[in-house]
Image (tube, rainbow, N blue to C red):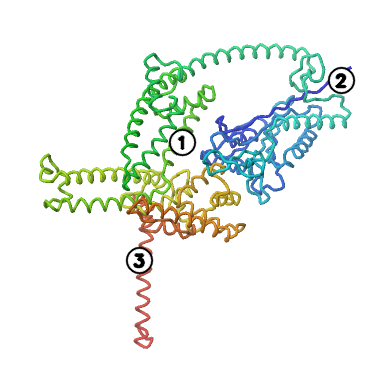
Amino acid sequence: MVTDMAIFHMSFSNISAGKGRSAIASAAYRSGKKLFDQKEGRSYFYARSVMPESFILTPKNAPEWASDRERLWNEVERKDRRANSRYAKEFNVALPVELSEDEQKELLTKYVQENFVDEGMVADVAIHRDHPDNPHAHVMLTNRPFNPDGTWGLKSKRENILDENGNKTYTGNSRFPRSRKVWLVDWDKKEKINQWRHNWAVSVNQVLEQKNIPDRISEKSFIEQGIDDTPMQHEGINSKRYERKEFNQQVKNYRKAKASYKNNQEKVINRGHLDSLSKHFSFNEKRVVNELSHELKTYISLESLDDKRRMLFNWKNSTLIKHAVGEDVTKQLLTINQQESSLKKADELLNKVVDRTTKKLYPELNFEQTTQAERRELIKETDSEQTIFKGSELNERLMNIRDDLLTQQLLTFTKRPYVGWKLLMQQEKEVKIELKYTLMIHDDSLESLEHVDQGLLEKYSPTEQQKITRAVKDLRTIMAVKQVIQTQYQEVLRRAFPNGNFNELPMIKQEQAYTAVMYYDPALKPCKAETIAQWQETPPRVFNTQEHLQGLAYLSGQLSLDQLENHHLQRVLKHDGTKQLFLGECKVDPTIKNSQIEKIQKQLKEQQAKDDQYRKANMGHYQPLNYKPVSPDYYLKTAFSDAIMTVLYARDEDYQRQKQERGLKETEWEMTKKQRQHQTRNRHEDGGMHL
């Protein structure tokens, strides 16, 4: 005889950025609380007819702020910034209707504490009782453990692959050893989830047995239990009402079959649309695709062209700088120009296909309010997830795409832009001197070249004409490269200081401001003057101790760059200026010995000296120019002096008015000071009796 069984319902899912979900919004919906999302600058609130009973359970290593729901999930999203980051794991569980509300809460709390919190996870629990027949709970769990000092820990680490003798192994000529990812927690394993489901069934059955309630639940299916029956759906107390249950089941089966049919139809239609992007070219387009694929040496797709564009951009910049310092790169520039031309044709072709596909999938989309790049990214995400976004989800996707595109454009930057700039200035100076002496032979000047006509160079010998032509070509190249560097500086600074007048700012000052912005404001949000003042008074701590140690391990050669989980840390360590700010921040970390940092600084200095020696041997006019160790507070006061602030906030009316008021106060104070000194001097001269 089989005992009547209560209903088991427990489902797990992930709340991830890849699916366009927000941890803040999810927590607000489940808890019924109003929560502010710092990243989006907006609040989430979902009104509920019955207020959920919510609380947070924290592990022993968690900091105090982990008990604050709003800060907890903001910190989670700040830590995990990847486009596919998993913010939280969630499970939904039906509570036994046979128990009272207090007994349900006690059972759930004990289960969550023992199975998740004691394992190192923070649990955000919300019990919903919107319907008395369906009490259930939503539990959001953090995916990342805490370190003993309360900072975020690692989900995984890289482990070197060793040979049979215990030595590191390498691939080809790579200087980085082969490695594999090792998970430090097992919270995503299927076996772990099955264990959690089993433990819930055991916990519920123990309480039911203590209450002398005959019902039991099991996480296993009827087939696994050897029961020849159709399982019921969770209906709470209403499961006793057989007629209503049977009717509801018929309705559910009908709706399920209808929804499944409709979903399959949509998938067939969508698959046809999605395939049209990559396969349904016209006959002429297929021919062009084959030719361009051969010329570009890559398959023509949205992803491959984006990669090719980035590669050509970096290659062209580095090649132009090599040309500016005297290397012969004619062949490389010719190849780059040919590939740029082919890339432009491929882009034009794919843009046509993207527009056709967008009109089919998103007829409601306004083409005038979206750019070509945004539509390309939208189709890429649609194709990747095999989903057509609708309504608010479509608007949210477009907003995220716009932010990502802008950030990618602004963060495309060379490693040592200011060093490259100084090299160009030196090269420009030498070319102009040589050109000046050539022109002086015939009483001409550099200014005369600006108004050159067909007959001006006839009086020069063929050798002199060749010198002038080469010099003019070099100067144009140098100007083009300088423009690239200057534009990149100002694009970043314009985001941080929208009211600045950067034409009045020397390049070295632009470099200093750029370095500070990229370190302390990587999102490139507009910086207020008050924010800069706060930075100068108390430099923000950008990275935690764990990230300090990882960064130092990379600088000492123990880790490769791709082993660092924090993308901002990767960018900081690529740029020499922000690297020095990072080392300065590490020095004020009380848990890190200064001797360790000084040892790394010595290694970096020695390596830089070798690089400089190599460049000197290969570039006749090369002059070493390296960033020196500096403390964050000194750097911020230097980079944002009063003179620099005046330029950065040149068109900021509030800042200029406050500056004027400060100037008047300082003038008044100086006048008062001089007046008092004058009175004191007169008193001394008159024996203290001056009236």
- For label 1, the crowd category at 10 Å Cα-Cα, with few meaning under 14, some 14 to 19 and many 20 or more, is few
Of residues 612 and 452, the one drawn nearer to the viewer in this rendering: 612
Q: Where is residue 463 in the image (x, y as percent from the top left)?
A: 17, 45
Q: What element carries label 2?
A: loop
Q: Which of marks 1 and 3 is nearer the N terminus?
A: 1
Q: Earlier in the sequence, mark 3 or mark 2?
A: 2
Residue type for callout 3: Thr
Asked if residue 252 is positioned above or below residue 671 in the image, the reply reads: above
Question: Mark 1 to mark 3: distance in Å?
Answer: 46 Å
| Discs 1/3, front | 1
Quarter-wise, where is residue 124 in the image?
top right
Q: Earlier in the sequence, mark 2 or mark 1?
A: 2
In the picture, measured across the screen, residue 162 lies left or right of residue 407, that is: right
Question: Mark 3 to mark 2: distance in Å?
Answer: 92 Å
Q: Can residue 142 be seen in this view?
A: no
| Image quarter of the C terminus | bottom left
- For label 2, the crowd category at 10 Å Cα-Cα, with few meaning under 14, some 14 to 19 and many 20 or more, is few
Residue type for callout 2: Thr
Question: In this figure, which residue is indicated by the disc labeled 1?
Answer: 403
Question: Residue 667's mark?
Answer: 3
Q: Label 3 near label 1: C-beta < 8 Å?
A: no
Of residues 39 and 431, the one drawn nearer to the viewer in this rendering: 431
In the picture, measured across the screen, residue 459 lies left or right of residue 509, that is: left
Residue type for callout 1: Asp
